[in-house]
Image (spheres, rainbow, N blue to C red):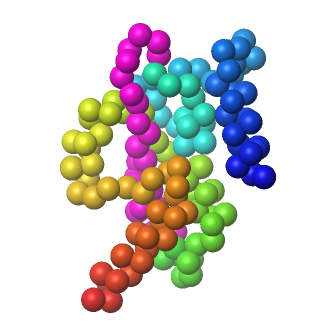
């Protein structure tokens, strides 16, 4: 039911009349803000043809790991989604993301499938720590 509601909301926000309703504005390069706000923004401005990607600063993996260590127990799905939604992002051109990830030294988790991605990464981090 939640996915249906989000799908309806997405279609409403992305309709051609969204701007008239005060809907999402086009996402601009170097725009910063909380993921929940930027993820709802429309794609790149018309005519640019350049795909923008939201990159978490600090990385979502680091933030989730830090919060889990402070809590002393695994995060719940609701906590993971809240951390993602309130995480700070910057909109970057797709071409620049590769260099940024290389400078970071690791890939971040997929924010659109954050719960499953976090479960996989957490298992890998725990295995590396034990082994």
Instruction: Say if 87 sits above or below 117 in the image.
Output: above
Tell me which segment is drawn in magenta: 45-67
Residue 75 in the figure: left or right of residue 127: right
Q: Residue at x 53, y 49 (%)?
A: 112
Q: Nearer the viewer, residue 65 or 116?
A: 116
- Give the vertical position of 13 relative to 110 (above or below): above
Residue 61 place in picture, x, y as percent: 42, 61
Image coords of residue 97 (percent x, y): 30, 40
At which x and y percent is residue 16? 66, 15
Question: Does the magenta-highlighted stretch encompass residue 46?
Answer: yes
User: Which of the image's four quarters has the C terminus?
Assistant: bottom left
Regarding residue 106, the answer to whether it shows in the image is: yes
Residue 30 visible in the displayed image: no
Give me the residue at 66% from left, 63% from top: 78
User: Could you tell me which residue is drawn at 39 percent across and 28 percent down?
Assistant: 51
Q: Position of residue 34 (x, y in %)?
A: 55, 42
In the displayed structure, would residue 67 be above or below residue 106?
A: below
* Front-most of residues 11 and 108: 11
Decide which of 116, 71 is in the foreground and name it: 116
Quadrant of the rendered image containing residue 98:
top left
Q: Residue at x 52, y 68 (%)?
A: 67
> Left of 57 or right of it: where is 33?
right
Residue at the extreme bottom: 130
């Amino acid at each position: 039911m939640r996915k249906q509601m989000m799908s309806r909301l997405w279609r409403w926000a992305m309709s051609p009349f969204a701007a008239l309703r005060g809907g999402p504005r086009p996402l601009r390069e170097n725009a910063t803000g909380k993921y929940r706000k930027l993820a709802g923004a429309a794609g790149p401005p018309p005519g640019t043809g350049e795909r923008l990607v939201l990159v978490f600063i600090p990385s979502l993996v680091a933030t989730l790991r830090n919060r889990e260590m402070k809590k002393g127990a695994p995060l719940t799905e609701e906590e993971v989604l809240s951390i993602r939604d309130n995480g700070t992002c910057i909109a970057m051109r797709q071409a620049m993301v590769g260099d940024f990830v290389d400078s970071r030294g690791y890939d971040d988790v997929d924010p659109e499938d954050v719960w499953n991605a976090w479960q996989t990464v957490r298992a890998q981090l725990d295995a590396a720590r034990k082994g």
